[in-house]
Amino acid sequence: MPRFVVALLAVLALVGPGPAQTTKSGDKPDAKVDPSDELFKPGPVPVFKITLDAETLKQLKQAPRTYVRCFVQVGDEKFKDVGIHVKGAAGSTRDWEDKPALTLNFDKFKDGQKFKGLDKIHLNNSVQDGSTMHEILYSEMALAMGVPTARAGHAVVELNGRKVGLYVLKEGYNSGFIKRHFPTATGGNLYDGGFLQDIDAELKLDSGKEADKRADLKALVKACQEKDKNTRYEAVSKLVDVDKFVTDAALQIITCDWDGYMRQRNNYRVYFPPNGGKAVFIPHGKDQLWQNTGEGLWHGWGGMVARAILDHPDGKKAVIAKLKEIQEKQFVLDKLNKRIDAWGKPAIEAQAAVNKDWAKNLLNEMVGLKDRLKQRAAYLKKELPKLK
């Protein structure tokens, strides 16, 4: 290991890998191992070597959001005809020659092809989070609190032999995600909230069938339009999993997430289980967290479902209870710092293999993140008791 990397890791004061991640199969010794689990816990960072021929690359540049075929190698595993396209919103989209965020769909052109049991993954460029840790910390807290969201980890990316550097790897949102996170559900509809759209927009259907003409979404919109706040809250509560919803609202408050569904009607999906099951809002796009650590605890809400639930006294009471629970169980500085350390060591080593200066910057960003978490924890300790 290069000497400067040793010095960097000493400064970071690494303390080991931290708590083991639980799997969907449970804790039984004989439970079936999920091959994707290794991607979403601290450890060696996989290197994705992605290759496109000249003609296909030209097609991708002309239509970046359209899938084209590529070749992918990760370690000794090789995959032909993998679907690839550029992803990202206004703030994170980058050209191929820069550091593009990418979606890889392993079975887009080849039925049944998967990587570690996953048919779709995202490689996020994390240009709005220099620490590359926001998505990981949020997903770990959300999953621990029972809010389904994509798991996150790290990856190094090479594009046609060019070493681009460290990325955030996330599992895709599709039928495979539903099976993984809602194992007892068969079917149902998963909608993508898109960019700054509420549930009354023409949301894209990620998984499910159009046969019901979006009756599930329309019913929820109608419930949100009830004029009386008590009638509205009761109607929405019959259609939405309120406990998961207020838990995610509390997480978005604690993490200073200004760009989620609650405030911005952005970065979310909503899943309607079959047979009239209650809708679950699924957060994603958590790269811009803890930017203002003194941010207030109660804002005006942008999403219509957020207004229906959080503006009601029962909803606010539930959120306050979740804030205190998260503060006690999840947003604990020692616990968070250990997670940053555990993820940080292999990430810094992987980044150093690409560019030493980038590795130094990554260390500085992780140290800065620890400081912001400390500031936020102090603010919560002071202000949360005042919230009524």
Image: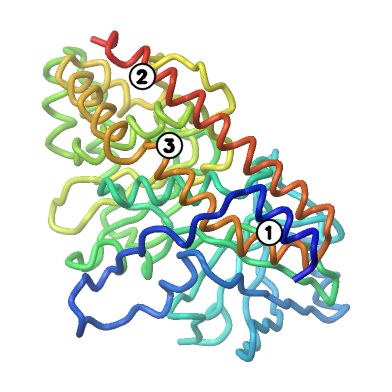
Give the distance between the C-alpha atoms of the residues marked 1 and 3, in whole angstroms: 21 Å
Q: Residue at x 46, y 65 (%)?
A: 40
> Which type of secondary structure does the marked residue at label 3 adopt?
helix
Whichever of labels 1 and 3 marks the residue nearer the N terminus, that label is 3
Against 312, residue 223 (above or below) is: below
Point out the image quarter for the C terminus: top left
> Which is more toward the observer, 325 or 296?
325
Residue 152 coordinates in the image, percent (x, y): 49, 58
Q: Which residue is mark 1?
A: 348
Whichever of labels 2 and 3 marks the residue nearer the N terminus, that label is 3
Tell me the quarter of the picture where residue 290 sits.
top right
Against 29, residue 338 (above or below) is: above
Please state which amino acid type lies under the numbered disc 1: Ile
Q: Residue at x 22, y 38 (%)?
A: 219
Q: Which mark is residue 381?
A: 2
Badge 3: how crowded within 10 Å, few (<14), some, or many (20+)? some
Against 100, residue 203 (above or below) is: above
Residue 368 coordinates in the image, percent (x, y): 64, 35
> Which is more toward the observer, 143 or 7?
7
Please state which amino acid type lies under the numbered disc 3: Leu
> Which is more toward the observer, 212 or 348?
348
Give the distance between the C-alpha atoms of the residues marked 2 and 3, in whole angstroms: 12 Å
> Which type of secondary structure does the marked residue at label 1 adopt?
helix
Q: Residue at x 64, y 45 (%)?
A: 131
Q: Which residue is mark 3?
A: 333
Whichever of labels 1 and 2 marks the residue nearer the N terminus, that label is 1
Q: Residue at x 44, y 14 (%)?
A: 296
Please state which amino acid type lies under the numbered disc 2: Lys
Q: Which mark is residue 159?
A: none
Tell me the quarter of the picture where residue 265 sits.
top left
349 with respect to 140 (left or right): right
Point out the image quarter for the N terminus: bottom right
